[in-house]
Image (cartoon, grey):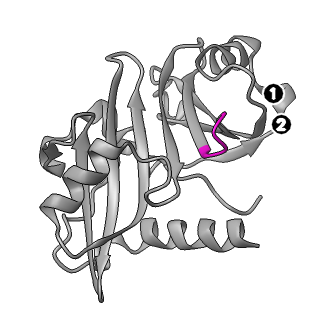
Amino acid sequence: MKKIVWFLMVMGLFLNQNLSVNAQPHMKHGGGMMMSKKLIETNDVPQVVKDAQQRLFPGTSVEKWFITERGNKEKGNSNKPEIYIARFKDKEGFLTHCRIKEDGEIRGSMTMLQGEKGLPQNIKDAVLKRFPGYKIQASQRVYHAKNNQKAYRVVLFQNSTKIITFTDENGNEIKEDKLAPEIKENIIETPDKQ
C-alpha cells in the first residue's frame, strides 16, 4: 500500500510541476514526456532489445514493455526509430525505465529514487545547502548511455512551495535550459493504466 501511495504521489509531482512556485518552468523533455506510448507484449519485443536491457541491468526482470514511435510511418516519416521502454525494478528495488532503440542501442534510463533514499550523499548535501529549510520529497537518477552521463532531478518542498532542481554527479546545479537534450529525452513517463 505504501508503494502505491508513493508512486501516485511521485506521478502527481510529474503532472503538477507546472503549478510550482519558484520552480523552473515546465519542460517538454526533448520529446521524452510528450511522446505517445503503448503497452506491448513481451513476445513483440525484439530479442536484441531484451538483450540490451539485460546488459545494462543484469539480473532484473522487466515488468512491462512499452513502445513509442518518434515519427508517423503512415505519413512517410519512417526515418525515426521506434523506442522500446522497459519498466522494471533495479537491483536496489527502485522503479526504472530504460529506453532502447529497435536495433538494441541503449538511449538511457530514469530511476525513480524514493526521496532521499537512493540519492548519493554528495547530491543530497549540495541540494540542501542550496535550498536550506527545504525537504527532499522525490528524486530521480537520469542516465544517458552514449555519453555515460548522469544527472539527478530533485523535488523539494517547504510549506506549500515546491522547487525542482537538476544536478550533475558532483552536486553542481544544472539550469534546466542548460540540461543536455540527451538527458532530457530520458526523463519519461509511461501510462499507469493498461
Snapshot quadrant of residue 148: top left
Q: Position of residue 18 (x, y in %)?
A: 30, 73
Residue under label 2, please give it: 41
Camera-nearest residue between 129 and 25:
129
The residue carrying pointer 1 sits among few (fewer than 14), some (14 to 19) or many (20 or more) residues within 10 Å by Cα, namely: few
Magenta-drawn segment: 91-95
Q: Residue at x 70, y 71 (%)?
A: 2
Q: Position of residue 91 (x, y in %)?
A: 66, 33
Q: Check the image and report above or below for 92 versus 128.
A: above
View extreme (right): residue = 43
Amino acid carrying label 2: it is Glu
Q: Check the image and report above or below for 76 versus 157.
A: above
Q: Report the quarter where the N terminus lies.
A: bottom right
Camera-nearest residue between 92 and 53:
92
Residue 93 is covered by the magenta coloring = yes
Q: Residue at x 49, y 54 (%)?
A: 117
The residue carrying pointer 2 sits among few (fewer than 14), some (14 to 19) or many (20 or more) residues within 10 Å by Cα, namely: few
Amino acid carrying label 1: it is Asp
Q: Position of residue 44 (x, y in %)?
A: 81, 27
Q: CA distance from mark 2 to mark 1?
A: 5 Å
Residue under label 1, please give it: 44
